[in-house]
Image (tube, rainbow, N blue to C red):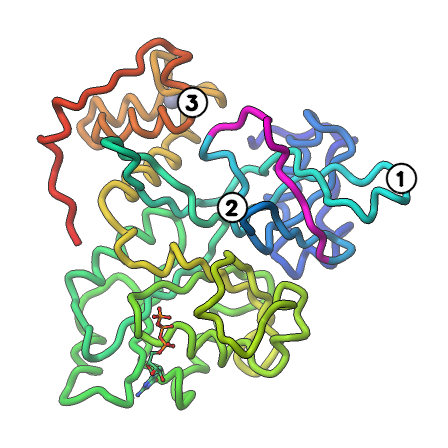
Amino acid sequence: MTSTPASAEFLAPHEFPALRAFGYGEAQAQALAAARAAFPGTLPARVSRVERNGYRLQTESGEQEAVWPAGRRHKLLDVPVIGDWVAYAPPEDEEGVEQALRIEAVLDRTNTFIRSVQKGRRTQPQVLAANVDTVFVMTSPEEWDTERLARYVQAVRLSQAQPVILLNKSDLARGDLLERAQVAGLEAPVLPISAQGGQGIEALTPYLQAGQTVALIGSSGMGKSTLTNRLLGEDAAATGALSDFSGEGRHTTTWRTLYRLPVSHISGGALLIDNPGLRDIAVWDDEGAAFWAIEELAAECRFSRCTHGREPGCAVRAAVLRGELDEDMVDAYREAQGTAQASGSGRERPERRGEKRPRRR
Ligand SMILES: Nc1nc2c(ncn2[C@@H]2O[C@H](COP(=O)(O)OP(=O)(O)OP(=O)(O)O)[C@@H](O)[C@H]2O)c(=O)[nH]1
Ligand SMILES: [Zn+2]
């Protein structure tokens, strides 16, 4: 929604100095204005933790519990995820301060990370994280695989985030791997680092500026936890989102969390998204990429509430006709959005399932 908002609904970013450190800026202020038109008086916050039964929000006045009201008819892709900006209803009275805040709307996302999940025989998109500026793809000398990395790089670029390859455990690199990695032709910087020893870590600084959001992905054992702990440093326990950070280690944490990195010689105070689902590199498949593409294209549809059915000026349909998008993927997406039924063209086509391209791993 890019139309100029009514002034009463528009709250300038500088009115939220604390949220600015969490990345609140002009785009969020515009999105909030649109949400306030529907939900007057709501205020902005960022989802800093997703729990089984609720959320933790970073508001201008600190972290607070919140709920996304059950029973509300919402579409699958509209459910708040880690990294989302939301509009919440401020508590009505003093007592209300003790209660969980109510999330009224998810603000327009600058991007989403979507994976495909299998529900029975159907493929369905699931949003893992939103509003990510940079994705660190972590690999190691033993696991270096140029082709596979090229696919992740492409997937990250599709989602409008910037890919950066971290070649961790560079202390273990043999022969000329570090040199070869630099000239592998990947459309992303390749940074040799050692999360354990700290070598090369300064190269991350440009991506870790205040208000920047980064996500770390990579298969098991690449050193994601080691790097996260190094970046969080001693200040970890002092950060709100980390109040349950314990000696048990992060492996036991199943929450999705947005950590604010302490300001150090490496980080200017960036936000780091840790999502167990995002860690699994298998999510970067063709289907997930198709769902991203649909989300991006949908912004170009003539109607902001386009269901990508038979509306005129639908950019998603146009891409299908051009052969750029798989129709099955569009159907799966529409089903998840709950729009397929409404527009009367929802079809299940199990007979075509067998024809689908094999999933690449
Ligand atoms: N030699 C060397 N070993 C490292 C380095 N970074 C991490 N390791 C080791 O690699 C192993 C795996 O590191 P983790 O940080 O647990 O890896 P992870 O990516 O978080 O793994 P999962 O939690 O399973 O996803 C540990 O034994 C680390 O000590 C490094 O820079 N050099
Ligand atoms: Zn459309």
Q: Position of residue 92 (x, y in %)?
A: 85, 36
- Mark 2 vs 1, N-terminal side: 2
What's the residue type where badge 1 is placed? Answer: Asp
For image coordinates 26% across by 16% down, the residue present is 347
Q: Which circle marks residue 93 in the picture? A: 1
Q: Which circle marks residue 81 in the picture? A: 2
Assign the N terminus to one quadrant of the image.
Answer: top right
Q: Is residue 74 magenta?
A: yes
For ligand 2, tell me if the residue under mark 3 lies within 8 Å: no
For image coordinates 37% across by 47% down, the residue present is 159
Q: In whole angstroms, how far apart are the C-alphas of marks 2 and 1?
A: 28 Å
For ligand 2, tell me if the residue under mark 1 lies within 8 Å: no
For image coordinates 33% across by 53% down, the residue present is 156
What's the residue type where badge 2 is placed? Answer: Val
Q: Residue furthest top?
A: 344
For image coordinates 26% across by 31% down, the residue present is 122
Q: Nearer the viewer, residue 302 or 331?
A: 331
Q: Nearer the viewer, residue 248 or 213?
A: 248
Q: Magenta part of the protein: which range?
A: 63-75
What's the residue type where badge 3 is placed? Answer: Gly
Secondary structure at badge 2 equals loop
Q: Position of residue 14 (x, y in %)?
A: 75, 52
Q: Relative to 216, does residue 109 appear above or below in the rendering?
A: above
Q: Position of residue 236 (x, y in %)?
A: 60, 75
Q: In whole angstroms, how far apart are the C-alphas of marks 3 and 1?
A: 36 Å
Discs 3, 1 touching: Cβ within 8 Å: no
Assign the C terminus to one quadrant of the image.
Answer: bottom left
Residue at the disc numbered 3: 338
Discs 2, 1 touching: Cβ within 8 Å: no
